[in-house]
Structures are given as structure tokens and as C-alpha cells.
Amino acid sequence: MLFEVRGITIWKDGTDKYVRIVARKDHNNMYVSIERKANVPITRELIMAEATGHYGIPAEDIVWPHHIKVIDI
Amino acid sequence: MSHGLPDFYRGVDIAYQALSEMIARPKYGVAHGIQGQVKVTKNAETTLVTVSGKGMLYGGFVWLDHDASQKACRVNIYTDGNRLTYRMFWELEKYNLIAEHAPVAYLLKCDETEFIYCVGLSYGYTFEESLVVKYSEEAGGTPMVLCELAFALV
């Protein structure tokens, strides 16, 4: 199973912080996205854990392109 | 020994019109929208939204409705860490910078009576690593700044 992170968006709505992970899944041109409220520091590890938990994908199977960096706010 | 491509593998002869139809379209990837609001820090630059990835800004706007002047403040757009915007609200109004792309964050409203300010975000600015929208507060206030953003990720 392929899970390639294509984008991470972080924003605030009032006092809450939100994260959206956009990924290409299963060699498909259709992207999937996971959106969560997360009032904690956002890190790569946290995102990997969320992808693993949501899709059941082992961390070593998650592709993280070098140009993707977590820019927390 | 045979070599080369099989006989059934051939290129397309455009001049011969071998294809009945060919569609060329830009593929920008997935379109996304977000809306958010942040109570910004006075006399500082506050981040409203960060997008990490490769893509393009489709548009959006940033606005606020405060109880004191914010004319010396500005909305800053950064792509891949590079700042694209420089003008404060009063400059956008004074020089009538209301057209999209001139500048990147162009003026939609600057009301010094009601203290309502709004800029639009221009279409078409691509990024290879990140797109960040910030508000630079330079008037000693803490307004609630709102943002609506549309972008694509490839």
C-alpha cells in the first residue's frame, strides 16, 4: 500500500489549531486528506502516527518527500 | 539479434492526425480551501496559515474588523520562504492598488472610519515547498484577523 504525503496545511480558527494531511494513496491519482483539530505542537512524528492510525499503514511504508516540511504555527 | 521497439509500438503522427482527439490540460492537483481566524500579537508578525507541499495559490482574502486604525499594518505572503508582499493598507489605498496581481495581496477595502480592512490574494503563484500567510501588526493592537484561502497541491 502506498501512502505518499503531498501536503500539510496548518491553520487556526479562533483558539483551535487544525491540521490537514493530503496524500496520494495506492498509486492512485485521487488524493486523500485527513483533517484533525490538534492543539499541540505539530511534528512529523505526529503526522506519521496519525496516518498510521487512520489507514493502518506501517510507518516505514509512508513516503515523505524531501520538500515536505512541517511548518507549525 | 532483433533490437528496437516492437512493430506495434509506434509514435503518434500528429501531422497525420492519427489521434481523433487530444486533450491538453494543466493538472494542478487537489484543490483545497481553508478558513481561519487568529487574534494576532501586537507589534509582531503572526502566522495565519501554513501550507507545506508543492502547489499553487488559487486565491482568497484576509480581512479584519477592528476598533482602531490598522492602516500601518499589512498582510504578508511567503512562498518557499520568500516574501511577495510589502505594502501596508494605507499605501494600497493611497496608490489605488486594487487590481489583482498588482500587488500579490491587492486592496479590497480600507475603511478608516469603521476600521475594516481587506485584501484579496492573487491567483497563480506557485510554490515548491511552502505557502505561508502572515499578518504584520504594527499599530499596537490585537485584532482578530480572518483568512480564507484556496490553493492546489500537486
Image (cartoon, coloured by chain):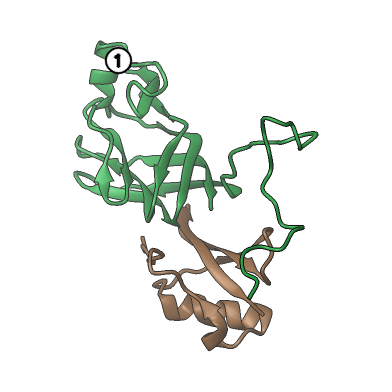
Chain colours: A brown, B green
Looking at the image, how many numbered discs can be counted on the residues? 1
**Pick the front one: B148 or B21:** B21
To which chain does the residue with label 1 belong?
A: B
In this rendering, would B134 be left or right of B100?
Answer: left
Mark yes or no: residue A8 visible: yes
* Residue found at x 44% / y 57%: B53
Residue B82: x %, y % from top left: 25, 45
Which quadrant: the N terminus of chain B? bottom right
Above/below status of B71 relative to B56: above
Residue positioned most to the front: B1
Q: Which residue is mark 1?
A: B93
* Residue found at x 37% / y 56%: B129
* Residue found at x 53% / y 53%: B154
Pointer 1 local density, CA inside 10 Å: few below 14, some 14–19, many at least 20: some
Residue B102: x %, y % from top left: 34, 20
Above/below status of A53 relative to B51: below
**Pick the front one: A11 or B106:** B106
Above/below status of A59 relative to B38: below
Mark yes or no: residue A18 visible: no
Where disc 1 sits, the SS reads: helix
Above/below status of B6 relative to B82: below
Residue A73: x %, y % from top left: 36, 60
Residue A43: x %, y % from top left: 40, 75
Residue positioned most to the right: B20
**Pick the front one: B49 or A44:** A44
Residue A31 image-quadrant placement:
bottom right
Amino acid type of the residue tagged 1 in the rendering: Glu
* Residue found at x 47% / y 31%: B123
